[in-house]
Every structure is written in structure tokens, then in C-alpha cells.
Image (cartoon, rainbow, N blue to C red):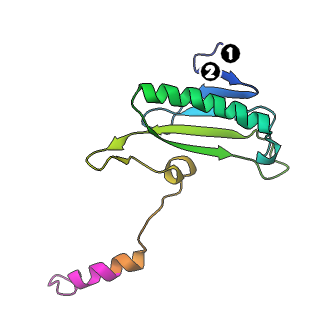
Amino acid sequence: MERAERYLGRCGDIHFLAAFSPLGILGEIFMLFTDRFAIDDITEGDWTFFSEGLTKIFRYLKERQTFSFNLAVYSGTEPEVQSWVYARLCPRILIPPWNTSDINYFEKLHGEVICVISPEEMAQGLKPLFSDDKNG
């Protein structure tokens, strides 16, 4: 495993890899917590090693003038599902002129789109514009 071209290395029992099929436009880093099946299994030492790995990633991103990212940690919750805890980090780009990030982590890493306006509120604002429509 350590000779694979996408394997970055390890800090303690946490393995860091460049994701095979990245979710981010600037790639993705995948982190695997060895033999940790739920978030409660992660020790203080694991968090320290995780932080050390993140520091290395942030150094890499800083060198490339990338200052924004999405990060999510995934944990099993069902006893019959045997999956190690893992994390994903996607660097983000900033979109001018507002320098806002390209996408949030809910959508990128959880597949959940966040909408800041309800359909009803949008309809309330749009209906008056259609009320004098001669084609309707």
C-alpha cells in the first residue's frame, strides 16, 4: 500500500491518500482511521496525528495559494456495518469578484444542497411579476 502512487503517507494509524475519484475541482485528500469503527473509538492521540496530517496538507495548500477547503469526517453508527472512520478534504477555489468559495461542504461532501430561500418565499416574490402576463 505504501508504494501506491496516490498514497501520501501516514501519521500514527491514520493513512492519507489522494482520492482516486476526487469530488473537488482541485482534487481531494482521503484520510482513513485504521481500526476505528465509530467516532467514539478515536483517541486523543488519533486526533493529534490527524492534526499533524492536516498541518502537512495545509502547508501544501498554502504554497499553492489555496486558503479554503471543505472537510468532513464520516463515522459508522450501526453495529452491523463494519467500516473504518474516514475523512475527506476538498480544496476550494475562490470566485471573483466577491472571493466566495465555489461550493459548501454540505453539497460537496454530503450530497445535500442548501437553499437559503423557501419555494414559498420565492413564489411570493415572483407571482406579482406574472399576474399581468397576457400569455397566461
Residue 24 x %, y %:
47, 38
Instruction: Name the residue nearer the viewer: 9 or 54.
Output: 54
Q: Is residue 18 visible?
A: no
Which residue has dot 2 on it?
A: 7
Identify the secondary structure beneath mark 2. Answer: strand
At horizontal 39% and vertical 46% (from top left) the residue drawn is 102
Magenta part of the protein: which range?
124-136
Q: Nearer the viewer, residue 9 or 58?
A: 58
| Residue pictured at 49% horizontal, 25% vertical | 60
Badge 2 amino acid: Tyr
Residue under numbered circle 1: 2
Looking at the picture, which amino acid does disc 1 mark? Answer: Glu
Asked if marks 2 and 1 touch (Cβ < 8 Å), the reply is: yes
Query: In terms of image quadrants, where is residue 17?
Result: top right
Q: Residue furthest left?
A: 134
Is 123 part of what is drawn in magenta?
Answer: no
Quadrant in which the C terminus is drawn? bottom left
